[in-house]
Image (cartoon, rainbow, N blue to C red):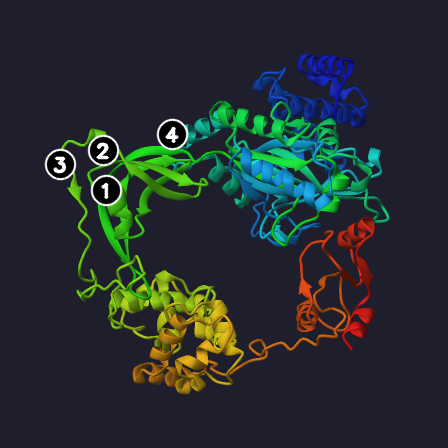
Amino acid sequence: MAYTNAEQKKLIDISKAFLVDPNRLNNGKIKEEIEVLKRVIVYHEWRYYVKNDPVLSDKEYDILFDLLKDAESEYPQLVTQDSPTQRVSVDIVEGAPTVRHLTSMLSLANSYNAEDLNDFDAQIRRLLKIPELEDVEYCVEPKYDGGTIVLVYENDQLARAATRGNGESGELITHNIKTMRSVPLSASFSKRNISRVELRGEALIRKDIFEEVNKMRAKNGEELFANPRNAATGGLRVKNPKDSERRRIQAFLYQIGFAADDNGNDLLSSFKTHDETIQMLADLGFKVPVVERKVCKNIAEAAQFCKYWEEQRDSYPYEIDGMVVKVNDLRLQRLAGSTAHHPRWAIAYKFKAKQATSKLIDVEYQIGKIGTITPVAKIEPVQLAGVTVTSISLHNEEFITSKDIRIGDTVLVERAGDVIPYIVKSITDIRDGTEQKIVFPSTCPSCDTALVKHEGEAAWRCENPKCEAQLIQRLVYHVSKEAMDIDGFGASYIERFHELGWINSLPDIYRLNYETIASLEGFGVKSANNLREAVEKAKMNPMHRFLASLSIHHLGKKASKLIASEISSVFDLIDWDEARYISIKDIGPTVAQNARRFFTDEENIQMLRDLESLGVNLEQTEEDRPRVVQSDSQLNGKTILFTGTLQQMGRKAAQQLAEANGAKNISAVSGNLDFLVAGEKAGSKLAKAKALGTVKIISEKEFLALID
């Protein structure tokens, strides 16, 4: 949507004509005049929301908008999907269904300085065999701190919008995205022969607008938003699109993830550079980074540009937490490919963590599931990188001693990577003598048992297995996603049911009276039944999950899987000595000693028998069994990816079968992919594999023949 000077002058003149004579709509050419008025309003939205350079007052814009709305109300047959009035739905969205993205969204690897960027450049050169004397061109743009959005346009119309979600699927948020006037409802992709395209961007609230929004909320007695990022990401998911519109969210577009013609042919490869794709989006009327985006001739220039914007960060109108450095040449991007987690051709340059000072008020001590005592600093609330921080882990006694941290100290706090709060140091120069040294407890704060610290360990621990604080943490861990994964059974339920005397051991989790739960305040029959179903489902978990859920010190998920593959029943471990554990590759003496101690304790054995009698699976399942790989398998050591709909089995079963034959499943098409198994309706992954030319594309039948 690039406008020439002549076009802009004409649209401004038409705007003035409508403002001077609103009755011109009634000149007998209502359909034509409505189309003209829509174009005028779209132009002014572009000037205001994309260019940040309006040529009308808010009042004048509202007059034009109301004029269109009234005309469409009188002639509803003339309302079109891309009309500016259709941005806000009058309906309340009752739910947010999930939709699969056309292409997977991966995370970015991080860098923090010029040396990291040089390493990234060296890696690109090694991967693509580029000589040292030859420059690699990079496109550098802001790493916005907002909510990621995925837009799909079909036949030039905005078809749907979604959040990033898990990278594969996201929540459908089309109604809310339509409220953003920086997102065109239609765009002329067809001029490039593109009939279907997926765009990626970031939803943001400008810093000054965020302050205005919060002032209005304060005036209305509403809860204030913590920061622009939270306000933007929350606004994407609100049920009423009008609530989203009030937050005045804007969207920057930064990537085309997929582009195809009517026949599904990949058109992304028709572009030469990433910068070219972004410029096309700008020409079509999308908001894209302009002065803050630069094509750099080499990594040194890219590093310099990143450093410049790190210094300008606070003056930039939007929250950014770094820059993104991308190989500009799209052909080189395709050759570089991706890992399972991130593209190899891009990296995030993270700005230094923001720091602030606060006062340390007190230290509390948390007790973990295996009795580890963790000191937690309570500080005066401080805003740090957009988040209010009040608690910070002090890790252990040695950390406190080495930094000479005292209660009453003014401390320098930062968020490492803008995520984890961390105390850098105490500011000792301003101590006034009232500060108190932190005395680490010698007994457990919960059960008063003497604490112990084993040789080679930094943490003090309570070794009383009956310690109530430990018990609660073990129960919480048992139901968590990392262990038995009992859906909806969170820490608050454990704590509440424990206070009521209903849960005092692991078997109690499986003895709950759901009729009684349904009568509790905040519950009901439906929520109680949902909990019952989740608990019953968890009983059928594979044995390795159960082993991991027992909170045996150092026995994590990996070790649990290794042990589960060697036994038919959990009770087999009663007869194992330490040597038997150590005979398994990757199981060490510490795990062996701790597991041996657990499975020779009579109380623990009785607990296991109670769990078995309650229907909890303690037997080896198919998922636990070791997978035997034939050395002569044609898939042994190869990477494989399944796409489309398989006819003879589900995708998970096919992946397990491939893994059993020595293959490694990966999630994206790249130069590292050996086999792509294409089922029916295979889409962009098939197109990308064909474009690469290095991937062997086979059918489901051919895949089965390979492993026959």
Task: Residue 428: give its label.
Answer: 2
Q: Which residue is mark 3?
A: 434
Earlier-in-chain disc, 3 versus 4: 4
User: Is 491 left or right of 63, judged from the image as shown?
Assistant: left
Earlier-in-chain disc, 1 versus 4: 4
Residue 245 seen: no
| Nearer the camera: disc 1 or disc 4 | 1
Label 2 element class: helix
Give residue 467's position: percent from left, percent from top.
24, 69
Can you say whether 306 is above or below 344 in the image?
Answer: above
Q: Which residue is mark 1?
A: 404
> Disc 3 residue type?
Thr
Earlier-in-chain disc, 3 versus 1: 1
| Nearer the camera: disc 3 or disc 1 | 1
> Disc 4 residue type?
Lys
- How far apart are the two marked residues, 1 and 4, measured between alpha carbons? 44 Å
> Disc 1 residue type?
Asp
